[in-house]
Image: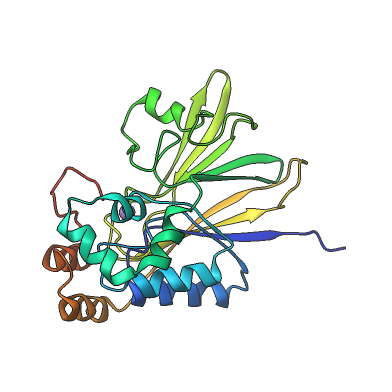
């Protein structure tokens, strides 16, 4: 007898980096994984926002909106946002505007929630050292996530470009918080990073649930060359981040 086992690849923060996205999608395909959920920030920072948006849209069953996806659409004041808007065109901007805030599903009897940055909004940033109250709030039902659904046991997000997994105590239960890292702009190392969830999808019965982190070398020289050619906003700072894995605003640790 064979047991049903489902695998879902979680990717985030592709940020217009096609060489990194290509490597990650090839790895996902090689493992025979068909389900890909995307935690946002498809665009901005990198040179190839239209291409990464189009490819993610084609291969991802779920995409939630990131802070860059939102800011590029809405920030009328910023010359950088205007540059990306011109590159993306009206149809893609409408698509970004209509992305959902979060996505909930059941896996191996657990309620899993995915969003870009936090349960508050795609712009509210939480780090693993943000303190107990902030970490516990990652499991809240809010107007942003929707109020009429089960509270999550497991929450996964992107935004900070640094992968981690942490148990979070709430009352006498232990929940699981994890960050999937970044495909296209990792700031905890220089490797393209994503997560594989393994379990039984849409099942209310308790069963094993695995959260695995994958780190992949990719062609950083190609990504830097593409960025230098387009001369996108702040391309030198972006290239430095790709080469070092260190955020441009040193030690503020952000994205
Ligand atoms: Mn980001």
Q: Tell me if residue 92 comes above or below residue 99 in the rendering.
A: below
Image location (x, y in percent) of residue 190: 27, 65
The answer to whether residue 104 is left or right of residue 228 is right
Q: Residue at x 47, y 68 (%)?
A: 56
Q: Residue at x 83, y 63 (%)?
A: 2
Q: Tell me if residue 186 comes above or below residue 156 in the rendering.
A: below
From the image, which quarter does the N terminus lie in? Answer: bottom right
Image location (x, y in percent) of residue 192: 36, 66
Q: Tell me if residue 182 comes above or below residue 120 in the rendering.
A: below
Q: Residue at x 30, y 59 (%)?
A: 186
Instruction: Depth check: give the residue in front, 218 or 226.
Output: 226
The answer to whether residue 162 is left or right of residue 227 is right
**Quarter of the image where one finds residue 226:** bottom left
Give the quadrant of ligand 1. bottom left
Query: Can the viewer see residue 161?
Result: no
**Quarter of the image where one finds residue 59:** bottom right
**Quarter of the image where one finds residue 193:** bottom left
Image location (x, y in percent) of residue 244: 18, 63
Instruction: Depth check: give the residue in front, 249 or 42.
Output: 42
Query: Can the viewer see residue 7?
Result: yes
């Amino acid at each position: 007898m064979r047991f049903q086992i489902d695998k879902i690849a979680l990717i985030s923060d592709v940020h217009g980096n096609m060489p990194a996205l290509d490597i990650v999608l090839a790895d996902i395909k090689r493992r025979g994984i068909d389900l890909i959920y995307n935690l946002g920030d498809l665009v901005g920072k990198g040179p190839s926002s239209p291409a990464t948006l189009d490819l993610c849209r084609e291969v991802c069953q779920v995409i939630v909106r990131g802070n860059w996806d939102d800011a590029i659409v809405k920030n009328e004041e910023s010359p950088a946002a205007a540059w990306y808007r011109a590159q993306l065109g009206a149809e893609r901007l409408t698509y970004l505007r209509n992305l959902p805030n979060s996505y909930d599903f059941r896996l191996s009897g657990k309620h899993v929630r995915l969003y870009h940055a936090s349960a508050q909004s795609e712009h509210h940033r939480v780090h693993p050292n943000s303190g107990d109250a902030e970490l516990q709030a990652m499991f809240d039902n809010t107007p942003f996530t929707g109020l009429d659904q089960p509270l999550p046991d497991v929450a996964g997000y992107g935004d900070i470009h640094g992968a981690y997994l942490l148990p979070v105590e709430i009352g006498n239960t232990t929940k699981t918080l994890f960050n999937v890292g970044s495909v296209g702009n990792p700031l905890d190392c220089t490797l393209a990073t994503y997560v594989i969830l393994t379990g039984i999808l849409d099942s209310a019965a308790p069963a094993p649930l695995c959260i695995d982190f994958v780190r992949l070398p990719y062609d950083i020289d190609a990504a830097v060359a593409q960025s230098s050619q387009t001369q996108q906003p702040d391309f030198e700072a972006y290239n430095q981040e790709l080469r070092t894995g260190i955020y441009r605003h040193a030690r503020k640790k952000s994205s």
